[in-house]
Image (cartoon, coloured by chain):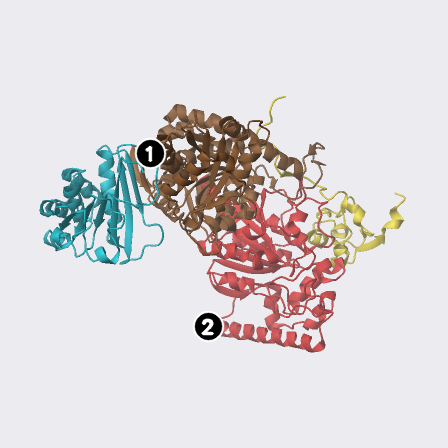
Chain colours: A red, B cyan, C brown, D yellow
């Protein structure tokens, strides 16, 4: 992999204007700002309804300095397909086409078009920014809302079902690059996008996005809470390159290091206030089991390949 | 309704090529001066072996009525078993013509007021070296002879064009031999 | 050069001649042979286009919307439930002012399932902001597809080219295949005022407020209502553009001349039958038969249904004894939509005719010429006894 | 009157700042950088810039010293929370009312 980006090597060019309508402390704003730096100016965006629609501005002013096609909720990946089709027809093979959808727009209403586009091998980068509920419409549960989270449609005891594993679903299409990232690790996100740009075909990047208003925490903790999700092993940073899965960055360090108790993370947010100790224990056990699996997979891999360079 | 339109109904089985036969006749009719040509296969799903219908209307002027043929002038039957199975005589105009691929003779099909023409297309096709069951080119020969609307040489040429790469000569020969061997009965 | 082919293949040749650049489609009967033919053209290298086999009709039109927004000439086709699955995108394409052309191979809508012809699919979308043109034969299909691009790109409004499923789509008829060079001379390439471009970034179709609002230079920009008003005004203006394009086409190719309604033996007619699609041609034979009986009747097929050419309707129908509207669709619980539109157009006329509405042919119910003859004869002989309720023709039980 | 071109008004937005207005007014407390503690300011060379990276609203410059655009800063306080040198403190806006 290319040398890692540092704060000092991160491009200064800003593609998102200040004074936009995103909430104070919006995790999406961080990821989006960094993401566009990585994508660069020769990019066309495709965006369905979501908080990003609001962030990007109301007619006639746009907060984003890239060309952007707003599309209907279910049509993001098809929209990106159409942009690509036209660019090919017009002889443009250099412009990056990036779709940037929320978790509902990806995992629920958008998954049919996304699956179709992945199967066809469309040459785009699809971003799912996962703030774990329909935030733009007022915090309704989505397919990626984690179990136990209170939303306006799981109002009392929280969501009963588990979080849909969208990156695994997309990876099952056998595409060249799938990665997870977090708004709290902007340089990791930046490097993953840079890597994605060197690969062709469908690429999928799933970004965990803390949301102060939707999750119930003070805006100043956005970055901290995103970090805790990773440090507790609840949300994992990894990439799947040509079918090869590997933990990256902060998550990779957790194999040898110590994970924070999930309780630390859950207690920071009012959306989890309905969780009993028993349910927290259950979540902890599930996370432990997942990580035991990771450790086993890694040791098998190490036996086969020898130590992997970090 | 329009008396100047010649209405031809084709009875065959899915996969037998009745549509292709009708298409060859449609093309030949058009170049022979029938500027109105309408060929409509059965609307819906066509399954191999099941009875199917194709309508062909030809006229010296433009045809406006695209509705299915209910009162044909000519009925063409690609498989004699359909004579009973599909009620092929339904609506056939008095004085109309029925052309059947059959080993039997017109006398075996005593439809009142109808001229019956027969040809053993299946046997002829095998004799000219076509694979078993290819009867849609031979039947064109029977049609040419019995209906007398189109020239057999024009039709044979059209067959060769349509069957480019698929035994064009043998298919054309099948039509020509059938033309010679078609038996036309009395009314 | 004339060829004898199906209506779907005629449409495919139209798309090829129009040099569509991005084609996205999802299979549905009876549209499929059209898109199969296009994929064949593309794969054989006869047509330089991107053929995108999408996973749904919603995506088919989404791809066209995005491709058109990026500056490519886009095409799709569908029928029945496929069209309804696109509905959100239909309205979007019109609101975004994208000159997409779509063939709607008219078919009845489930439930219960039907694959056969009627007009309920396209008629149900008459308010989507698209231009709708109906065809009566293969020559009109191929010629309309080509003119549709000219029209769509001139007025920045998408166009639906509608033709009867099976009756036209699967029926073989002769039609003229014009030389590509002549079509190129007629139809200029697609040059949108704006296309997505990193060198000139713009954010398309963002949330637009109820009220007007200043842009970054302080000039007032329209609100949602102004933008939608423009769509309506431009649709009305498209009536004139349709006529201009028809005139150009007629001059170049000698075909056309009736862009709004296609009249047959209407000049001295007391009674005029009106309908959409191939039915108007079937009615020509009926009109001939009734003329032989001494009845002064004519028929007019509506070609341009949206925007509704109300002046042409008034010019043709005002002062007649009766207008008989035959429809393969209806606004359930009310009456045929075309019937309502025609009555509304004639309402200001003092000499408006009596009007009568027949509903027929739903879900592919065979329309026998003898039935039409009987119905039209009855309506001609007793025009004053005509009621306003639609009469269902051909119900069997 | 000359007729307008077809479709000349569409919902096509142009990029520019301040779509949401002067979002600085959303703030209750204001981040103030203590240049004595701020790493790049102290070292007088490019360093740290954690506040710049994490600012959701792109209102902190990557300069020495970093400068905050109070016209648009929404006062989320992430910069104060993340500053490794604890150089940013949040000051009640009421103090600045007179300015």
Is residue C319 placed above or below C59 in the rendered structure?
Answer: above
Locate the N terminus of chain C and report the quarter of the image it occupies: top left
Q: Are marks 2 and 1 in contact (CB under 8 Å)?
A: no
Answer left or right for A94 relative to A18. left
- Which mark identifies residue C177? 1
Asked whether residue A116 is in view, the answer is yes
List x then y, in percent, for residue B154.
17, 37
Task: Determine the residue positioned at 66% across, 40% down.
Answer: A59
Circle 2 sits on which residue?
A304
- Chain letter for mark 2, please: A
Bin the neighbour count of mark 2 within 10 Å (Cα to Cα): few under 14, some 14-19, many 20 and up: few
Answer left or right for A115 relative to A9. left
Task: Determine the residue positioned at 10% across, 53% down.
Answer: B127
Closest to the observer, C137 or C213: C137
Closest to the observer, C37 or C31: C31
List x then y, in percent, for residue D62.
70, 47
């Amino acid at each position: 992999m290319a040398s890692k980006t540092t704060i000092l090597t991160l491009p200064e060019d800003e593609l998102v204007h200040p004074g936009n309508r995103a909430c104070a402390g919006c995790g999406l704003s961080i990821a989006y700002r960094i993401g566009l730096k990585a994508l660069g100016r020769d990019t066309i965006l495709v965006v369905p309804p979501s908080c990003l629609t609001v962030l990007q501005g109301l007619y006639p002013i746009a907060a984003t300095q890239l060309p952007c096609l707003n599309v209907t909720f279910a049509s993001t990946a098809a929209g990106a397909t159409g942009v690509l089709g036209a660019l090919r027809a017009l002889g443009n093979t250099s412009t990056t086409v990036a779709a940037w959808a929320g978790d509902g727009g990806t995992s629920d209403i958008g998954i049919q078009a996304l699956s179709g586009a992945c199967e066809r091998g469309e040459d785009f980068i699809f971003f799912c920014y996962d703030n774990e509920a329909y935030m733009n419409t007022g915090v309704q549960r989505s397919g990626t809302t984690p179990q136990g989270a209170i939303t306006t449609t799981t109002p009392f005891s929280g969501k009963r079902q588990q979080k849909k594993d969208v990156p695994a679903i997309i990876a099952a299409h056998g595409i060249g690059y799938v990665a997870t990232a977090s708004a709290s690790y902007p340089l990791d996100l930046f490097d993953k996008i840079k890597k994605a740009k060197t690969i062709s075909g469908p690429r999928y990047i799933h970004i965990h996005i803390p949301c102060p208003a939707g999750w119930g925490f003070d805006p100043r903790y956005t970055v901290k809470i995103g970090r805790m999700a990773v440090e507790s092993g609840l949300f994992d940073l990894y990439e799947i390159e040509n079918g090869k899965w590997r933990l990256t960055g902060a998550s990779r360090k957790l194999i040898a290091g110590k994970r924070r108790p999930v309780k630390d993370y859950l207690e920071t947010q009012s959306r989890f206030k309905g969780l009993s100790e028993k349910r927290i224990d259950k979540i902890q056990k599930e996370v432990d089991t997942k990580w035991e699996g990771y450790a086993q997979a890694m040791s098998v891999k190490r036996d086969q390949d020898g130590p992997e360079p970090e | 309704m329009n008396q100047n339109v010649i209405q031809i109904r084709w009875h065959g089985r899915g996969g037998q090529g009745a549509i292709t036969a009708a298409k060859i006749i449609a093309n030949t009719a058009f170049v022979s001066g029938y500027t109105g040509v309408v060929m409509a296969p059965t609307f819906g799903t066509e399954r191999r072996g099941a009875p199917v219908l194709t309508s062909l209307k030809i006229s010296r002027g433009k045809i406006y009525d695209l509705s299915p043929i209910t009162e044909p002038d000519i009925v063409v039957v690609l498989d004699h078993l359909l004579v009973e199975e599909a009620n092929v005589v339904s609506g056939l105009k008095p004085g109309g013509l029925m052309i059947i691929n059959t080993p039997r003779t017109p006398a075996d099909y005593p439809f009142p007021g109808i001229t019956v023409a027969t040809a053993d297309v299946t046997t002829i096709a095998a004799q000219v070296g076509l694979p078993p069951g290819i009867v849609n080119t031979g039947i064109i020969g029977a049609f040419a002879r019995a209906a007398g609307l189109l020239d057999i040489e024009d039709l044979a040429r059209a067959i060769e064009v349509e069957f480019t790469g698929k035994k064009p000569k043998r298919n054309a020969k099948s039509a020509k031999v059938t033309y010679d061997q078609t038996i036309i009965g009395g009314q | 050069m004339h060829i004898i082919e199906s209506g779907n293949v005629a449409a495919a040749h139209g798309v090829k001649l129009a040099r569509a650049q991005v084609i996205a489609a999802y299979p549905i009967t009876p549209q499929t042979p059209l898109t199969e033919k296009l994929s064949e053209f593309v794969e054989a290298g006869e047509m330089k286009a991107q053929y995108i086999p999408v996973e749904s009709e919603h995506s088919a039109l989404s791809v066209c919307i995005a491709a058109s927004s990026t500056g490519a000439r886009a095409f799709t086709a569908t029928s029945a439930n496929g069209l309804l699955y696109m509905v959100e995108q239909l309205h979007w394409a019109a609101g975004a002012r994208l000159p997409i052309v779509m063939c709607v191979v008219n078919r009845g809508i489930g439930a219960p399932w039907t694959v056969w012809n009627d007009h309920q699919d396209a008629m149900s979308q008459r308010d989507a902001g698209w231009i709708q043109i109906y065809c009566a034969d293969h020559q009109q299909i191929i010629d309309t597809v080509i003119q549709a691009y000219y029209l769509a790109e001139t007025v920045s409004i998408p166009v639906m080219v509608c033709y009867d499923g099976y009756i036209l789509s699967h029926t073989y008829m002769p039609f003229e295949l014009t030389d590509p060079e002549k079509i190129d001379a007629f139809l200029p390439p697609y040059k949108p005022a704006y296309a997505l471009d990193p060198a000139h970034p713009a954010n398309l179709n963002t949330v637009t407020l109820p009220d007007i609002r200043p842009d970054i230079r302080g000039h007032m920009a329209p609100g949602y209502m102004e933008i939608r008003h423009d769509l309506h005004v431009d649709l009305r203006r498209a009536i004139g553009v349709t006529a201009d394009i028809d005139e150009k086409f007629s001059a170049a190719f000698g075909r056309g001349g009736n862009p709004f309604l296609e009249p047959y033996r209407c000049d001295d007619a007391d009674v005029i039958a009106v309908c959409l699609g191939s039915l108007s041609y079937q009615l020509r034979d009926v009109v001939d038969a009734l003329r032989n009986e001494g009845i002064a009747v004519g028929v007019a097929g509506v070609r341009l249904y949206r925007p509704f050419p109300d002046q042409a309707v008034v010019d043709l129908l005002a002062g007649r004894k009766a207008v008989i509207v035959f429809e393969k669709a209806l606004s359930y619980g009310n009456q045929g939509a075309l019937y309502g539109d025609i009555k509304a157009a004639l309402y200001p006329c003092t000499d408006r005719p009596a009007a009568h509405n027949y509903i027929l042919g739903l879900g592919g119910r065979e329309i026998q010429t003898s039935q039409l003859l009987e119905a039209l004869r009855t309506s001609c002989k007793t025009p004053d006894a005509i009621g306003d309720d639609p009469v269902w023709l051909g119900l069997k039980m | 009157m000359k007729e307008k071109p077809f479709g000349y008004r569409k919902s096509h937005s142009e990029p520019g700042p301040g779509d949401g207005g002067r979002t600085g007014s959303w703030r209750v407390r204001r981040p103030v950088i203590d240049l004595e503690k701020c790493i790049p300011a102290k070292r007088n060379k490019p360093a740290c810039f954690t506040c710049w990276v994490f600012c959701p609203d792109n209102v902190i410059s990557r300069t020495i010293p970093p400068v905050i655009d109070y016209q648009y800063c929404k006062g989320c306080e992430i910069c104060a929370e993340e500053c490794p040198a604890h150089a940013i403190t949040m000051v009640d806006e009421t103090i600045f009312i007179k300015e």
